[in-house]
Amino acid sequence: MIDTIRAYQHHKVGLTWIPVSPLWRTLRKVCNTHVFASMKLDATQYLRRNKIQELIANVGKSCHKGEAIKIGQAIFDTTINLLSNTIFSVDLADPNSSSAQEFRKIVCDIMVEAGKPNLVDYFPLLKKIDLKGAWR
């Protein structure tokens, strides 16, 4: 497990990081019952279909205008809107706004920073020095 995950305490609560334990079993049961159950997935199928239709419509509009399509941005907006609609019943990313592009850049920057190798991952003795500044 990389040091950045430990620095932000994600290893204590993230389902992908915590070891098999009663907490892990509880979280897994909640996910299987409330998130990934066939009935729940079937209930939100219309939402997924609707978001894909919106994506196709936006691509079609761009094609008619002769504009280039930023595939990464379009997929990101669709994914964020699908998740935000599932959780909050509202779109968080408007494909026509600059704030959606800024949000994507922030998320990408976070992923890049979290994924950067840290010397501590290879040399645990350097943990006290905190060269990356992850523990500050």
Image: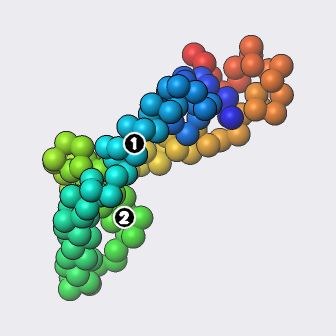
Q: Residues within 10 Å of mark 1 (few under 14, many from 20)?
A: few
The colour scheme used here is: rainbow
Evaluate if marks 2 and 1 touch, with contact meaning CB atoms under 8 Å apart.
no
Query: Relative to 53, is 46 above or below?
Result: above
Task: Mark yes or no: residue 106 visible.
Answer: no
Residue identifier under label 2: 75
In the picture provided, is 106 more to the left or to the right than 55?
A: right
Query: Relative to 109, is 130 above or below?
Result: above
Name the amino acid type tagged 2: Ile
In the picture provided, is 111 more to the left or to the right than 89?
A: right
Label drawn at residue 121: none
Q: Earlier in the sequence, mark 2 or mark 1?
A: 1
> In 3D space, how far apart are the residues under numbered discs 2 and 1 (Cα atoms)?
24 Å
What residue is at 52 percent from the left and 44 percent from the top?
111
Q: Assign a secondary structure to mark 2.
A: helix
In the picture provided, is 101 more to the left or to the right than 2?
A: left
| Residue 10 x %, y % | 53, 28
Q: Assign a secondary structure to mark 1.
A: helix
| Residue 112 x %, y % | 56, 45
Name the amino acid type tagged 1: Cys
From the viewer's side, name the closer residue of 18 and 101: 18
| Residue 31 x %, y % | 39, 42
Residue identifier under label 1: 31
Task: Mark yes or no: residue 110 visible.
Answer: yes
Q: Residues within 10 Å of mark 2 (few under 14, many from 20)?
A: some
What residue is at 80 percent from the left and 24 percent from the top?
124
What is the quadrant of the N terminus in the image? top right
